[in-house]
Image (cartoon, grey):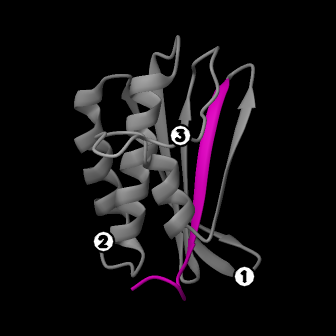
Amino acid sequence: MWSDRAGVREDVQAMTLGRDPGEVPSARRFVRAVLAGHRAAGDAELLASELVTNAVVHADGAGRVTVRVVASETGVHVEVADDGRSGMPCWREPEAGEEGGRGFQLVDAIATRWGLLRDPAGTCCWFDLDDSQAL
């Protein structure tokens, strides 16, 4: 769905998934399809995958995860929201050789801006990628 905000044309699309690790590839395909041809597509797919993985693995009490992608000429905004009622995403320093625990480190290294919001309805982790930084 295209919309105009402050004179910038945006494509806004969302997909809701079950809280199941098997849904992570579906989220990746969704982000890849929405951003096909966009300079930030690869980075957005990687970071969205990390945040969706965090939500399906760690969101206590969650039943669903929603991925929302906003694409424009100037960049990309992605939100990953879950309906979990407890717990809070946190930064970890994984041990050497540990397979997981680097999601927020990747988001921090690649995204222009990122953050999270927690309220009674759940948690939303988001990031922005400016088109000028995408390779």
Q: Give the residues in magenta.
A: 122-135
| Residue 73 vertical placement versus 77 (above, below) | below
Residue 60 sits above or below residue 93 on the image: above
Q: Is residue 81 left or right of residue 55?
A: right
Residue placed under numbered mark 3 in the picture: 92
Q: Nearer the viewer, mark 3 or mark 2?
A: 3
Report the residue at 54% width, 88% height from top: 132
Q: Amino acid at mark 3?
A: Arg
Marks 3 and 2, how far apart in space?
A: 32 Å
The amino acid marked with disc number 2 is Ala
- Find residue 7 and name its label: 1
99 in magenta: no
Front disc: 1 or 3: 3
Tag 1: residue type? Gly
In this rendering, the answer to whether 30 lies above or below 62 is below
Earlier-in-chain disc, 1 versus 2: 1
